[in-house]
Image (cartoon, helix red, strand yellow):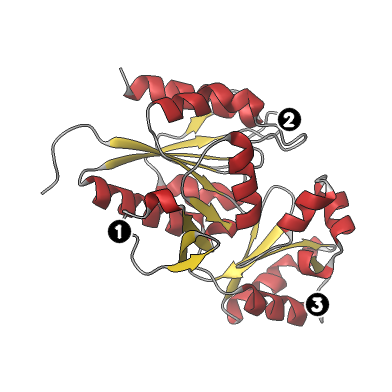
Amino acid sequence: MKRKGKKRLIFFTDIDGSLMNRGDYSWEPARPALNRLQELNIPLVICTSRTRMEVTAIQEEMGITGPIIVENGGGIFFPEGYVTLPVGSVIISGGLRCILLGKPYGRVRSFMDEAKGGFSVRGFGDMSVGEVSELTGLPPDKAALAQAREFTELFVLENEDELPDLELLARSRGFFITRGGRFFHCMGMGSDKGVAVARVQEIFARNWNRGALTVGFGDSPNDFPLLKAVNIPILIPQEDGTFEELDLPGLIRAPHPGSRGWNEAALQVVASKHR
């Protein structure tokens, strides 16, 4: 039986275009809200298309810890401080406990190699560090972390008219394609941000022995599964102030793009739930 009392908050957030600005990759405007979450011991679960190595480096820069959902839900990693959580079947990887949801990167790359025979696709695995750096605007050391993929492939499609046929081929091979802020993403069927968010929420709620109230932030179509999986979805606008088309009950639209909008929306939610 669950204990009575307020449900505890869990925050799930995309990085690029949400917690971090898409142009300059700055997260500093979100510092007040990040500090407030830490003060209140509210878990912040990063949920991103980025790699595990990228996210752990970002967490270190921000001075935060917590579970991470990487590569659009391909894997969930819990740090050592969360070892008491009943996370189920796990493996140990880099000092982290991992729940695997996606397909191994080698299988994704095999499909991408097949797709190159008929489509104008070029993935991160086909590029040099310099090319990834130029495309993303990341310095070479961080571009190398972006290439350290374990579950998914980011790619460009020179002729986007090919997308419907590429999606059909992907589905026939057990994969699917989604669009992020700058790149297309190829991943295994059955793994997305929403599936991973639901799994993490269930783990926390079971450990707390009471309900969890989930808050989610995203700005792009590949964040829609995340936003659909949470109780309080918050859509961040694009850099030009426009929003992706999404109709969800209770959807909150942040007042500004990037980390500034993230900060204001996060502080408002926390204030409304901690009166």
Observer-nearest of 40 and 93: 93
Residue 49, position as x, y percentages in the image: 62, 54
Observer-nearest of 98 and 157: 98
Q: Amino acid at mark 1?
A: Pro
The C terminus, quarter of image: top left
In terms of secondary structure, where does tag 3 sit? loop
Q: Amino acid at mark 3?
A: Lys
Residue under numbered circle 2:
240
Q: Look at discs 1 and 3 and give the one toward the viewer.
A: 1
| Residue drawn at 73 percent across, 75 percent down | 112
Q: Amino acid at mark 2?
A: Asp
Q: Does label 1 or label 2 sit earlier along the sequence?
A: 1
Q: Gap in Å between the C-alphas at discs 1 and 3?
A: 42 Å
Residue under numbered circle 1:
86
Residue under numbered circle 3:
116
Mark 2 burial class by Cα count in 10 Å: few <14, some 14-19, many 20+ = few
In the rendered image, the vertical position of residue 233 relative to residue 34, given as above or below: below
| Left or right of residue 225, residue 18 in this image | right
Q: Look at discs 1 and 2 and give the one toward the viewer.
A: 1
Q: Gap in Å between the C-alphas at discs 2 and 3?
A: 33 Å
Q: Does label 2 or label 3 sit earlier along the sequence?
A: 3
| Residue drawn at 76 percent across, 50 percent down | 142
Q: Residue furthest top?
A: 275
